[in-house]
Amino acid sequence: MTENSQGARTERSRQLFDRARRIVPGGVNSPVRAFGSVGGTPRFIRSGKGSRITDVDGNSYLDLIDSWGPMILGHAHPAVIDAVQQAVGRGLSFGTPSEGEVLLAEEIVARIGPVEQVRLVSSGTEATMSAVRLARGFTHRAKIVKFAGCYHGHVDALLAAAGSGVATFALPDSAGVTAATTAEVIVLPYNDIDAVRVAFADHPGEIAAVITEAAAANMGVVPPAPGFNAALAQVCHDDGALLITDEVLTGFRVSRTGMYGLDGAQEGWAPDLMTFGKVIGGGLPVGAFGGRADVMALLSPLGPVYQAGTLSGNPIATAAGLATLQQLDDAVYEKLTATAGSIGELAAAALGAAGVPHRLQRAGTLFSVFFTDAEVTNFDLARTQHTAAFAAFFHAMLDAGIYLPPSAFEAWFVSAAIDDDDLQTIADALPAAANAAARALHHG
């Protein structure tokens, strides 16, 4: 489409996409950006302010991606911009310790009880890769349990039956990942604690760790069944294994204390290691992993588990992350929760009125709408949804100036910058989008 209901034009985005495809594989630097599962031309974004982003053709969109989570305060938040500008004025990178990394680490530890020590890295992928290595080094075991549909970055071993971009492109795993790499990884259905118990019974004393998204959000939002994460902790600890909860998406996004604050802190269990990203960088590249002090003590330079990174603890990224976290008080989370609830309910009501089978699922301030009428508790069920209906829905919303994640297997993200006028814009756009989804179902 070259025009939308706003009179939007996409010529400049088309030109840039054509240029990019000549020099960048697929024209993008992360696969879901290519619009491969929804079709059409990806929008090249030039700027963002508050709840909105503007593309290179001058079209404005209400943003429900928020850079996949980090822009929780909205784009170009004054406090974050000021912190970054001050940090830039002092220099971009030093390759030495700096105060910002200490302050950010202290903020993370202060918020998350089970995290006694934390190490900063430059991406969520680095965080999960390092946490798995550390778990193996601590337990002197090799096997790892993960769940189908949970995505932990593009670590070779953890791409087996991953979700998110892999689900979007219907790839069960990735070419280039050898059988030897995944031989020590056991992939189980999410939310199936009996399968976990069987795996431990079959491999007593061999499993180093279970790694799970604290709430699955890369096959759409699939919250853990009540007691599932607590049972994982119990099974792991009974066998001497570690539990790693991946909060790269949910950390400081679904609540002030992440998914742990809505789950483990309420039920009285704790993971041994946790991974973070997204929000803790305020939009700049950063990741972190942390947990029990006795486990973290095995990291070099104190212990034998090697991990390093030239840009780890970068002063610009830590400034943006710290400024973001300092703004995230209880009032902000109350607003985010209310906003997410309102948008989810508006979408569900519109789809219901149009006769479109759907399922609204939430984890704190994260939510997604599955185009199926059954509860989604695992990856196999997530894949039963009608992706063509989602594609029609997505484009109708985009035409109305609302930018949703361009995949049926992603969470929707809200920012604190969304106001009542924005909610009305969404409400006005939804009936036509729901009708477009209904037509796709009837012609599918």
Image (cartoon, rainbow, N blue to C red):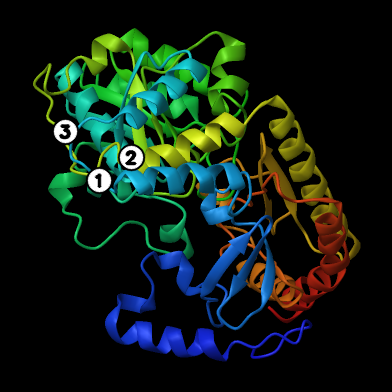
Q: Name the residue under label 2.
A: 315
Q: In the figure, 334 relative to 418: above or below? A: above
Q: In the figure, 338 relative to 387: above or below? A: above
Q: What element carries label 1?
A: loop
C-beta proximity under 8 Å, tags 3 and 2? no
Question: Which tag is nearer the camera, tag 1 or tag 3?
Answer: 1
Q: Reading the chain from its start, which is encountered first: label 3 or label 2? A: 3
Q: In which quarter of the image is residue 295?
A: top left
Task: Report the amino acid beneath label 2.
Answer: Pro
The span from disc 1 to disc 2 (Cα, nearest Å) is: 6 Å
Q: In the figure, 191 relative to 425: above or below? A: above
Question: Which tag is nearer the camera, tag 3 or tag 2?
Answer: 2
Q: Name the residue under label 1.
A: 93
Q: Reading the chain from its start, which is encountered first: label 1 or label 3? A: 1
Q: Which of 331 and 90 is in front in this view?
A: 90
Q: Nearer the viewer, residue 291 or 60?
A: 60
Q: Position of residue 80 (x, y in %)?
A: 53, 44
At 45% across and 52% down in the image, what residue appears?
Answer: 163
Mark number displayed over residue 307: 3
